[in-house]
Amino acid sequence: MLRRKSILLPLIFLFSLCALAQSSAINQEQTLIALERMWGQAQLTRDSAALERLVSPGFVNTEWDGTVDDRAKFLSDIRDPLYKPASMSLRDISIKLYGNTAIVVGVYHAEGQYRDRPYDHVGRFTDTWILVDGRWQCVASHASLLSKR
């Protein structure tokens, strides 16, 4: 009987840890999905202050057309009065967690005007997030155009 307890207790502890880790991973995934949706909303409302809190100081952005920008350029583009987004939606979001790093992949649909020219883009995005001091920050974003209407 004592031998069974000595085997069962560590197993129960191990299963509890696994359940806790799985629960934590689900919570992290939900947080990252919410952050991605906040990002889309901030782009739609041209809220550069919100985006500034989401992207790290060393942020690197690769746009759908291949241009590569740093954080300052990315934020200035959001503030540009010639940028007039009309809609932004996300779908098919998947997340891979690697400790304090997460890769988020999904599909976006963005419509609006830039320099009085309409745009309607559907593309795939890949964002790399790191957990720093308990807060997720995006360090790199890449978008590839699937279709341009």
Image: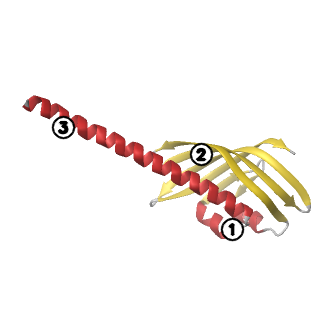
Q: Secondary structure at mark 1?
A: helix
Q: Quadrant of the C terminus?
A: top right
Q: Secondary structure at mark 2?
A: strand
Residue at 82% x, 70% y is 81
Q: Is residue 88 visible?
A: yes
Circle 1 crowding by C-alpha within 10 Å: few under 14, some 14–19, many from 20:
some
Q: Nearer the viewer, residue 71 or 15?
A: 15
Q: Report the residue marked by disc 3.
A: 9
Residue at 18% x, 37% y is 9
Q: Nearer the viewer, residue 106 or 78?
A: 106
- Give the quarter of the image for residue 21: top left
Q: Earlier in the sequence, mark 2 or mark 1?
A: 1
Q: Earlier in the sequence, mark 3 or mark 2?
A: 3
The span from disc 3 to disc 2 (Cα, nearest Å) is: 37 Å
Q: Is residue 65 visible?
A: no
Q: Report the residue marked by disc 2.
A: 104
Circle 2 crowding by C-alpha within 10 Å: few under 14, some 14–19, many from 20:
many
Amino acid at pointer 3: Leu
Amino acid at pointer 1: Ser
Q: Report the residue marked by disc 1.
A: 48
The span from disc 1 to disc 3 (Cα, nearest Å) is: 52 Å
